[in-house]
Image (cartoon, rainbow, N blue to C red):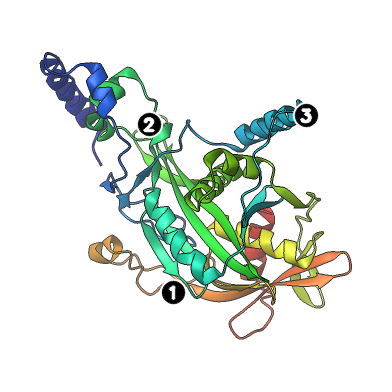
């Protein structure tokens, strides 16, 4: 990683070069040529992730959220403004034919009147158009996962950066990374599209600010909503139509209190949900995606997710591997184990439980740990 001293030294040279060119290029000229750079860049060390998450790639694509950063608060404010405008008699753009945004709590998804086989390749194209590298592509499971990327809009657009353009981009960093997971599910004659993301924030580990480490951060539902809106626009909706559809998503079920403590149901460790089985299934999927679990398969009709999980509390020693194995993401003898998360309907909601690869109830610390992660993100 470039040291801070080297960054400032390089920046000083860049300032000098820009001043020397001032006679032939004005600041306005530089600004008019400024473009968003979607190229993958090598910036520093690979992200160091918890062992139960997938290893990040070295390359860091860049993307930009138009109009600054996105947040759930911003979307709530936009929703209130939209509701006020509607009450004032302003015209609301009509719904987009064949596309509808649904909502349950903070979870939004896009419902399309199309076959998953038609939608899937369009989603690959969408993420490429947004500047992401697709890191995982599983048509059978309906899962698309991007590489880690940096939101360049979070870097302040001050005068120096605007004047120097890509030169400053080489030495500036937002200190945040996101990775998006898209999941498709067939639901009758429609296709449901879910978007979730993981966030990592570069955090100082000492008072001097000389040692930094990438640590997981909370998912922002507002950012998922922004990407759903962009996806709608990519699929043919007008931008304002897409934003309006996300703000006024059709509510499937109102938020309810969720039990945070595990219980024993029919002899196995389980998590109770106050929601119907199909709604619980959607929420569990979003929780698994945001937690970084790898989903190998899913079925709404069966109420299941097949996930891969690396338990780091089994007492087995982790092999660090040599330099080349770490460089290429080889973790030696460590192999994530498949588990099935199943949602079963009951009288007052549904029950979430975990089964091992033999089909037996996972009544161990591992099963309880998976359920707690789901509960925390429910």
Quarter holding residue 175: top left
Q: Earlier in the sequence, mark 2 or mark 3?
A: 3
| Closer to the eye: label 1 or 2 | 1
Q: Report the side of 288 relative to 28 (left or right).
A: right
- Which label sits on residue 335? 1
Q: Secondary structure at mark 2?
A: loop
- Separation of disc 1 and disc 2 at Cα? 35 Å
Identify the residue at the far top of this view.
23
x 44%, y 74%: residue = 335
Query: Hey, which quadrant is residue 365 in on the image?
Result: bottom right
Residue 215: percent from left, percent from top: 47, 46
Tell me the tag on residue 87.
3
Camera sees residue 320:
yes
Q: Which element type, helix, strand or loop, lies under badge 1? A: loop
**Secondary structure state at the residue bearing disc 3:** helix
Considering depth in this image, is 98 or 325 the residue closer to the camera?
A: 98
Q: Residue at x 24, y 32 (%)?
A: 166
Q: Is residue 88 left or right of residue 139?
A: right
Within 10 Å of disc 3 (Cα), the crowding (few <14, some 14-19, many 20+) is few
Note whether 219 is above or below 308 in the view shown.
above
Residue 90, quarter of the rendered image: top right
Q: Is residue 220 visible?
A: no
Crowding at dot 1, Cα within 10 Å, few <14 / some 14-19 / many 20+, comes out as few
Q: CA distance from mark 2 to mark 3?
A: 51 Å
Q: Does the residue at mark 1 contact the one at mark 3 (Cβ under 8 Å)?
A: no
Residue 156 image position (x, y, % from top left): 39, 26
Circle 2 is placed at which residue position?
209
Q: Earlier in the sequence, mark 1 or mark 3?
A: 3
Identify whether 82 is placed above or below 183.
Answer: above
Q: CA distance from mark 1 to mark 3?
A: 56 Å
């Amino acid at each position: 990683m470039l040291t801070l001293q080297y960054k400032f030294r390089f920046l000083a040279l860049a300032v000098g070069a820009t001043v020397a060119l001032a006679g032939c290029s004005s600041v306005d000229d530089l600004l008019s040529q400024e473009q968003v750079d979607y190229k993958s860049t090598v910036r520093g060390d690979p992200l160091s992730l918890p062992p139960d998450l997938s290893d990040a790639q070295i390359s860091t694509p860049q993307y930009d959220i138009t109009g600054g950063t996105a947040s759930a608060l911003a979307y709530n404010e936009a929703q209130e403004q939209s509701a006020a405008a509607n009450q004032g008699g302003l015209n609301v753009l009509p719904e987009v034919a064949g596309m509808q945004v649904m909502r349950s709590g903070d979870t939004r998804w896009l419902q399309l009147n199309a076959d998953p086989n038609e939608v899937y390749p369009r989603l690959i194209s969408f993420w490429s158009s947004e500047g992401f590298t697709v890191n995982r592509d599983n048509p059978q499971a309906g899962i698309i996962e991007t590489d880690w990327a940096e939101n360049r809009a979070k870097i302040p657009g001050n005068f120096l950066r605007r004047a120097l353009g890509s030169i400053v981009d080489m030495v500036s960093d937002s200190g945040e990374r996101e990775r998006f997971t898209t999941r498709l599910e067939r639901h009758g004659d429609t296709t449901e599209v879910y978007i979730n993301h993981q966030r990592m924030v570069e955090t100082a580990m000492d008072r001097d600010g000389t040692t930094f480490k990438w640590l997981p951060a909370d998912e922002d539902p507002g950012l998922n909503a922004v990407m759903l809106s962009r996806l709608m626009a990519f699929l043919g909706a007008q931008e304002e139509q897409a934003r309006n559809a996300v703000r006024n998503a059709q509510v499937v079920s109102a938020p309810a209190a969720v039990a945070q403590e595990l219980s024993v149901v029919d002899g196995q460790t389980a998590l109770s949900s106050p929601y119907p089985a199909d709604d619980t299934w959607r929420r569990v999927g979003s929780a698994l995606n945001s937690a970084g679990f790898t989903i190998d398969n899913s079925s709404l009709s069966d109420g299941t997710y097949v996930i891969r999980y690396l338990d780091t509390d089994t007492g087995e020693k982790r092999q660090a591997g040599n330099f080349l194995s770490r460089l290429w993401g080889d973790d030696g003898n460590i192999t994530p184990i498949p588990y099935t998360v199943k949602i079963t309907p009951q009288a007052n909601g549904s029950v979430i439980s975990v089964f091992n690869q033999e089909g037996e109830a996972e009544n161990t610390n591992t099963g309880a740990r998976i359920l707690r992660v789901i509960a925390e993100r429910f």
